[in-house]
Amino acid sequence: MFKKKKDIDFIYDKTDYVNRIANTEFNNLEEVISSPIGLDNRIDNINKFGANTVVVKKFNWLKEFIGSLTELFNLLLLAIGTLEIIIFLTLETGFITLVSALIIYFMVILAACVDFQQEYKAYKESIQLHHEIENEIYILTNRVVDINTLDNQKQDLVKIKQSELTIGDVIYLSPGDIVPTDCRIIKSNDLYIDQSTLNGETEYILKSINNTKERLLDLENILFAHTMVKQGNCYAVVINISVNNYSDSIGNTIEDIDDESDYERSLKKISQILIGFILIITPIIFVISWSTSGFAKNDFVGPLVFALSIAVALVPEALPAIISANLKLGSKVISKNKVIIKNLACIQNMGSVNVLTTDKTGTLTLNEFEVNNIVDYSFNQSDWLNTITSINAHASNMLNNKIDSAINNHFKDLKIKYELISTIDFSHENKLSGVIAKVNKQKLLIIKGSFEEVIKLISKVRNNNKVEDVKPGFVEKLNEFNNQQANLNNKILIVASKVVDSKDNSVSELVFEGFVGLEEKLKQDVIRIIKIFQNYGIDIKVLTGDNEKVSENLVKKIGLDVKKISGEQIVSVSEELIKSFNLFYELSPLDKAQIISILQKDNVVAFLGDGVNDAIGLKKADVGISVNDGSALAKQSADIIMLEKDLDVLEQAFIQGRKTFANAVKFVNITIASNLGLLITLLISSIWFSLTYKANNFIFLPMSPIQLLLQNLIFDFANLVFVLDSVDDNSIKSPSRWSTKSIIPFALWNGTVHVIVSCINFLIMGYGFKMFQQITNGNVETLHQFQTAFFIEVVITHIILIMVYRTSKFSFTGPKSNSLFNGLMLMFAFIPFLIILIDLPIHKMELEFIKNGFWYLTLLGLITLSFGLAELFKHSYIRFNNKWI
């Protein structure tokens, strides 16, 4: 559960090598890569360089299991259990000591097994993600000497698995292919690459055989693994394989990031607090108890066992088991909402998340466009414009079809008859596409393309259904509209046409028809969900590699007030100021992780992303969230994978995380408060009894060690029922962090109820029923009855504290606990009576049936008092601290 935190340090050690390759002429390339370009004999290079296989770190069974066993809290429990075994073997304290030790061992091993099983499950999922369906790639089977002859060598292309590639292989890529490994282009044809998985940018990037850039991801003739060919084709030589690829090197960095989450850090602090208390209190209790006998050498065993029993009672041994059960239950509920939980511990962290950082493309947006405006020269709707725009989009044969898909979807109910004659495919050089079609018996050339390119081809304009020559001010009017839309970050296309015949079908002297405005499409209900997150106290921050205008427009659309900063600017800004921004754009993968790291200093941070460039951020965050169709590296790095891109699912996961977190925190705070109250009671009574009452033939302890261990076992099993409890509404409405600083004040204040009730019980039994006098006279039976009465009262008071402290409201008006929870609590309250009444070897437990019937009436009064005091102390605490647990 607890892992050593490591700093992020991602340096791609092949940067200089790749830059050198990018700037080397083809004739000198073989010398740089130390291999022929194109392989006649691939075996030699595979033996020399290896193949493009996936390397997965082996699962070290022994190391992982020992790591799970030796977490700090588990070590504390193991130490206590071992002490109990030693006491049992050497001091003959009775079987309860052995049972207590075995239960402690069982809970530690159970928690370790759950942790180990989860680690192994994550390892198996990692293997599966690495070995997803493997693509086959075309390679040349002979050496390339002259790039001008490549087109004549297509008959030499053969398919192999991408894992069989090696340095020097020449591959052929066409639209739709995913680049299998880092390559240098040696020949290309109108090649455009989708590199968004690395840099987050939605615009496709032109690649060619030459390079003029310096930044690694901007190199114009280098193809990076996991990017996609969107248009054109190319031949490229493999320059890096396997872990030497840029994206795979990110994966290696991720394996070295093993951060403690906020929840794990809190548990570690609690363990340290408990260890400190035990080291201080145990010797004090031992010395005080032993002093009763005047420090007689023969009487140290009882006080020692009693002091160690108090140490056992103070520690919530059930904590690992409760956390495991809590997480399993939460995981089961969340999984019903089509979510895969890879890391169980993240469910607790989700309950504390108050900052959600998210990538843009694929998470908030669909990576699709939608039409938001189609207007003519007068900025009005036009049936004619709608008709020809629809024909162009419907008939175009574009490889980059996001825009056409958006237009076709916009006009899906429009029925148009036309006869397609020919098409002009989209080209990134002139940034337009066109069709020639017969419409209403006219042969029309219909062009759609970028504002900057198409406006150069226009000589006429359709104005009020009349075609006119372009007049002065025409270009200025269109530029003004385009700039307005650009400020809103709408993508503007121009639609133009002309009547053509067999003599003239050139793309020139066009008639301006109108504008098509497009915007990036948000996911369904994303604005509503963002508002819900904000209402739940979660701050939204967008982390993207995309440019400023695109990113800013998105943040505005989802309803946030933009406070922006670029990746270049963050290095010159203080960490405190960085926390105030909600849009971080033009970020590298390392930038995202560093921003998350800064935010984590005061917050619990979740990160939602799906690209290779998001992987380090996903691993670094307290909760990493990806989607099922995200990159393999993103899914490998995430704690949670959503099977559907539905942010409603994420809302439910946060709610369940808060319920799970609330129950875990309730358990620890209430248990420590009750245990600390018992400890203070025992400390007071030990001093009180040792100074005031000295028995003739035994040490007067308020509860025998065996009874103390027995009530501790009852507490452990009663505490396990916390996983079934419901939680307050305010535990769900806002994120909660576990304040370890407040645990001791909470426990001291609210544990005082235990002290008051027990001391009143002592006074009534000691003075009202004259037990102190009988015990001083050496009456062992009376001592056992006194201890039994204290034992019963302690167990019942603990159950009452659970029932009252489980909610910040009045216990009878708070969230209703289910019948199973109530039934089990009632059962645990009756266990002490059952032990006494049924035929058990109770003499070994030193329990004695209380013969004075008036004490049972006293017990009813103590129960009523416990309820009243618990409610009083609870509401007083809330009044002064403005919060409960």
Image (spheres, rainbow, N blue to C red):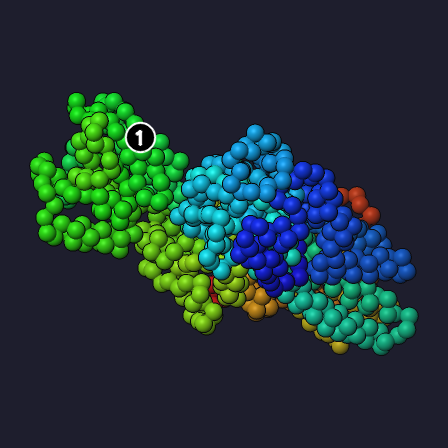
Whether residue 797 is visible:
no
Whether residue 496 is visible:
yes
Q: Residues within 10 Å of mark 1 (few under 14, many from 20)?
A: some
Q: Nearest the camera: 482 or 271?
A: 482
Q: Which residue is mark 1?
A: 423
Question: Which residue shows up at 71% across the image and 58% down it?
Answer: 71
Q: Is residue 773 above or below residue 10?
A: below
Q: Nearest the camera: 680 or 42?
A: 42
Question: Which residue shows up at 82% across the image and 58% down it?
Answer: 82
Q: Nearest the camera: 797 or 518?
A: 518
> Is 881 left or right of 488, judged from the image as shown?
right
Q: Which image quadrant: the N terminus?
A: bottom right
Q: Nearest the camera: 469 or 674?
A: 469
Question: Which residue shows up at 27% across the image and 46% down it?
Answer: 453
Residue 86: horizontal and vertical position, in percent?
86, 60
Question: Which residue shows up at 63% across the image and 37% down it?
Answer: 142
> Is 277 left or right of 543, judged from the image as shown?
right
Residue 418: horizontal and vertical position, in percent?
23, 23
